[in-house]
Image (cartoon, rainbow, N blue to C red):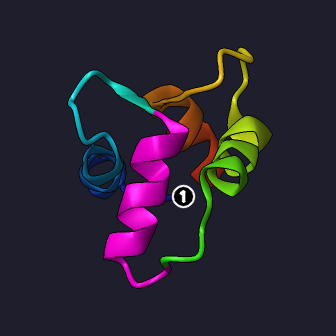
Amino acid sequence: MADIEAARTAFQRYDKDGDGLVTAAEYKKVMAELGDPYVTESVAQAVINAKDANDDGVLSFEEFWAAINH
C-alpha cells in the first residue's frame, strides 16, 4: 500500500495547472522533465486512458491512487 501523502505530492507534480486533473499534455511535460522527451501526447493519453475509470480522458487523484494501489 502506497503512502497517500507521497501519492498526493507525486500527483501534484503532474497536475501542472492545479485543477485536480492530469491531462495528456501535463503528463507529457512531466515525463520530459524527468528525462523522457520521447513520450508523445498520444502515448501519454494512452497511459491515462488505461487508468481512467470514468472515461473522461483525464486522471483524477482518486484514479491515480487506485492505479498505484491495485
Residue 18 appears left or right of 27: left
- Magenta-drawn stretch contains 34: yes
Q: Using the rendered image of the protein, determine whether residue 70 is visible from the camera's viewpoint.
A: no
x and y percentages locating residue 20 in the rendered image:
32, 24
Residue 54 appears left or right of 36: right
Q: Amino acid at mark 1?
A: Met
Residue 45 appears left or right of 13: right
Q: Using the rendered image of the protein, determine whether residue 67 is visible from the camera's viewpoint.
A: yes
Residue beneath the point at 69% across and 30% down: 52
In the picture, residue 24 is in which quadrant?
A: top right
Residue beneath the point at 45% across and 68% down: 31
Residue situated furthest bottom in the rendering: 35
x and y percentages locating residue 50 in the rendered image:
78, 42
Residue beneath the point at 70% across and 48% down: 42
In the picture, residue 15 is in which quadrant?
A: top left
- Magenta-drawn stretch contains 28: yes
Which residue position holds label 1? 1
Q: Residues within 10 Å of mark 1 (few under 14, many from 20)?
A: few
Q: Which element carries disc 1, helix, strand or loop? A: loop
Q: Assign the magenta stretch its main secondary structure.
A: helix
Give the answer, above or below, for where 1 lies relative to 64. below
Q: Quadrant of the N terminus?
A: bottom right
- Write the start and end of the magenta stretch as one range: 23-36
Closer to us: 3 or 34: 34
Give the answer, above or below, for where 11 lies relative to 23. below
Give the answer, above or below, for where 41 lies relative to 51. below
Residue beneath the point at 40% across and 72% down: 32
